[in-house]
Amino acid sequence: MDEVDEKIISVLEKDSRTPFTEIAKSLDLSDVAVKKRVEKLLASGILKRFSVELDQEKMGKPVRAYVLLRCSPENTDKIVSDLRDKVKVERTIGSYDLLLSVDFEDIQALRNFVEDDLGAIMGIAEIRTLIRV
C-alpha cells in the first residue's frame, strides 16, 4: 500500500459511492488505474466492504444503545453466534466481553430487549446499558 492507495481509501471512507472517474480526476490517474488499485485493496483484505450509513431517526429508531455484556467464558462463543444475526456484536478486552450496538424506536423497546431477549440467554453474567443522546 502506498500514498496513492491511502488517498483512495480516504476518499472512499468519506463516501464509498464516489465514482472511480471522480477519484481518478482528483488524483491525476485513469479510472482504470483506480479500479485496479481498489480491486487490489479488496483482494488483500485492506478494504473489507463498502457500507451504508443510515439515519436511524428517520428510520423510526432514534434510540441508540451500547450494551456491555460480561459473559461466562464457556458461553461467549455461543452468545456471539446467537446475537450476531440480530445486532452488531464486537468482542472487547477488559471488564466486559462483548459490546452490542443496537437501535430502538423507544426506551421501552430497549428495556424489552435487555430484559426479555438478553435476559433469556444463558451465560450472561452482567449487562450494562449506555444510551446515546
Image: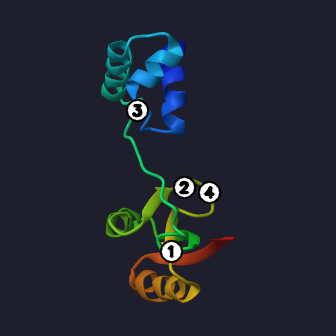
Earlier along the polypeptide chain: callout 1 or callout 3? 3
Mark 2: secondary structure: loop
Residue 25 picture location, percent across and down:
48, 16
Q: Give the residue at x 50% y 74%.
A: 61
Q: Which mark is residue 47?
A: 3
Earlier along the polypeptide chain: callout 2 or callout 1? 1
Q: Give the residue at x 62% y 57%.
A: 94
For the residues labelled 2 and 3, the Cα–Cα distance comes to 22 Å
Q: Residues within 10 Å of mark 4 (few under 14, many from 20)?
A: few
Q: Residues within 10 Å of mark 3 (few under 14, many from 20)?
A: some
Residue 131 picture location, percent across and down:
64, 73
Label 2 is placed on what type of residue?
Thr
Mark 1 touches mark 4? (CB < 8 Å)? no
For the residues labelled 2 and 1, the Cα–Cα distance comes to 25 Å
Residue 69 picture location, percent across and down:
53, 70
Q: Nearer the viewer, mark 1 or mark 4?
A: 1
Q: Is residue 6 left or right of residue 42?
A: right
Q: Which mark is residue 92?
A: 2
Residue position marked by numbered label 1 in the rendering: 61
Residue that sits furthest to the right in the current view = 133
Residue position marked by numbered label 4 in the rendering: 94
For the residues labelled 1 and 4, the Cα–Cα distance comes to 30 Å
For the residues labelled 1 and 3, the Cα–Cα distance comes to 29 Å
Label 1 is placed on what type of residue?
Lys
Q: Residues within 10 Å of mark 2 (few under 14, many from 20)?
A: few
Q: Residues within 10 Å of mark 1 (few under 14, many from 20)?
A: some
Q: Is residue 24 above or below residue 101?
A: above
For the residues labelled 4 and 2, the Cα–Cα distance comes to 7 Å
Mark 1: secondary structure: loop
